Image (spheres, rainbow, N blue to C red):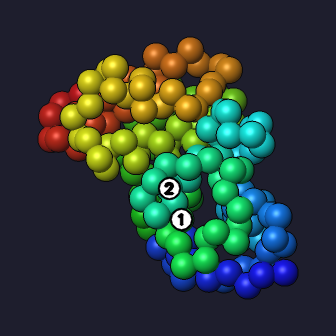
């Protein structure tokens, strides 16, 4: 077992993990961050997307031990003090979710995009979210929610 110290969703955190445990396992099982979902376990679906030291990664492909000293942001860290992030609000308002398995990954990926580019084109949003798969929505409402959030963050009406 390894003792890991990391910052998760803005809080100093410690957990124990086996050498072969994934970051996804640690988040869900040790830290009770169950918003991060396991869809495929092979990095193909994006349901377990987290921001790891500023980079969007699939938590199923990162060893938990690699989190030593790292900063990890999950879907649970998007809202602040019980107030939804505009992205979360637009996902609700624009009906950009159905079953919910993929939603946390899309939210984390979209937030990472909007932190880098507050004025993305539809093509840029589609490209950035290409690593996230959804079996229910057809993507249009997800893309619209991200673009509406970007407009709001720029101070424009959506």
| Distance between the alpha carbons at the discs numbered 2 and 1 | 6 Å
Callout 2 crowding tier (Cα within 10 Å): few <14, some 14–19, many ≥20: many
Total marks in image: 2
Query: Is 8 positioned to the left or the right of 17 in the image?
Result: left
Q: Does residue 63 show up?
A: yes
Q: Quadrant of residue 151?
A: top left
**Residue 103, disc:** none
Residue 99 pos. (x, y %): 69, 30
Q: Quadrant of residue 19?
A: bottom right
- Residue for point 40% across, 46% down: 111
Residue 115 lies, with reference to residue 69, above or below; the image says above
CB atoms of marks 2 and 1 within 8 Å: yes
In this view, the residue in front, 150 or 125, is: 125
Residue 51 pos. (x, y %): 50, 55
Query: Is 117 positioned to the left or the right of 48 in the image?
Result: left
Residue 124 pos. (x, y %): 33, 26
Residue tagged 1 = 72
- Image quadrant holding the C terminus, namely top left
Residue tagged 2 = 51
- Residue for point 61% across, 77% down: 68
- Image quadrant holding the N terminus, namely bottom right
- Sequence-wise, the earlier of marks 2 and 1 is 2
Residue 37 lies, with reference to residue 73, above or below; the image says above
């Amino acid at each position: 077992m390894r003792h890991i110290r990391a910052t998760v969703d803005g809080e100093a955190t410690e957990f124990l993990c086996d050498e072969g445990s994934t970051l996804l396992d640690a988040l869900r099982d040790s830290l009770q961050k169950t918003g991060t979902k396991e869809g495929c376990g092979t990095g193909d679906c994006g349901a377990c997307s987290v921001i790891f030291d500023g980079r969007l990664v699939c938590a199923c492909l990162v060893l938990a031990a690699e989190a030593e000293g790292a900063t990890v942001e999950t879907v649970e860290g998007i809202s602040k003090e019980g107030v939804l992030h505009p992205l979360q609000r637009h996902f609700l308002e624009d009906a950009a979710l159905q079953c919910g398995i993929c939603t946390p990954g899309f939210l984390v990926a979209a937030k990472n995009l909007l932190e880098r580019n507050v004025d993305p084109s539809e093509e840029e949003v589609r490209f950035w979210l290409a690593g996230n798969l959804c079996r229910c929505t057809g993507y249009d409402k997800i893309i619209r929610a991200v673009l509406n959030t970007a407009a709001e963050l720029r101070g424009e009406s959506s």
